[in-house]
Image (cartoon, rainbow, N blue to C red):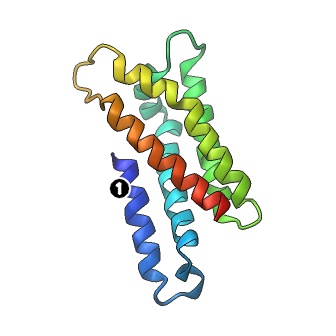
Amino acid sequence: MVPLLVLVAVTLLARLVGLAVAPLADLVNCLAIGVAAMFLFTASARLNPARRTAMEWMVPPHLPRPGLLVAISGVAEAAGAVGVLIPQTRTLAGVALAVLLLAVFPANVYAARAPARPGLRVTPLSQRTALQVVFVAACLVVAWA
C-alpha cells in the first residue's frame, strides 16, 4: 500500500509544482515522476540487505537464489525509474517496468497464499492484484502517452 501512496503523493506534488514550473504542467511528466519515485522506493527495499532478506520469502520455492532474484529486481526497478525520467528512454523504460511487474506477479500470488508468518501482515491477493493493475497502467500511460 505504501508504494501506491508514494505514486499518488509524488504525482500530485509534481502536479502542484507544475502550476509554477512549465515542464511539470504536463500530467504525463508528473506521472513519470510519481512512477520513478515509487520504483526508487521499492528498489531501495530490495537493495537494502536487511530488507532484502525479509522479502526473500516471497520468492516461490522452486526458483533458485531468492536473495539474488530480489536484488536483480531492485536493480531493474531503479534502472527503470531513471529511464522513465528521460524522454528518450521513457517508452522503453515504462514498458520494461510493466513487464517486470508482470514477471514478479507470481511472487505476489505465492506470498498471498503462503502460510501466515508471525509479525508479518500479508496483503490479500485481491488487493495485490488491484495494486499491480494500477502500477502496470501507470507504467503504460507513461510509456505511451
Q: 135 or 69: nearer the eye?
A: 135
Dot 1: within a 10 Å radius of its alpha carbon, few (fewer than 14), some, or many (20 or more) residues?
Answer: few
Front residue of 4 and 125:
125
Q: Is residue 92 left or right of residue 51?
A: right
Residue occupying the point 39% across, 41% down? 130
| Residue in the image at 74% along x and 59% along y | 89
**Is the residue 100 above or below the residue 114 in the image?**
below
Indicate the position of residue 137 as horizontal and vertical percent values: 52, 51
Badge 1 amino acid: Leu
Question: Which residue, as the protein is rendered here, is positioned at the far bottom?
Answer: 20
> In this rendering, is residue 100 above or below 68?
below
Residue 142 on image: x %, y %: 60, 61
Q: Residue furthest top?
A: 62
- The quadrant of the rendering that contains the N terminus is top left
List x then y, in percent, for residue 105: 51, 30
- The C terminus, quarter of image: bottom right
Write the residue at 35% across / 18% down. 113
Residue at the spot x=70%, y=65% of the render? 86
Write down the residue under mark 1.
5
Between 26 and 47, which is closer to the camera in this rendering? 26
Q: Is residue 117 above or below residue 72?
A: above
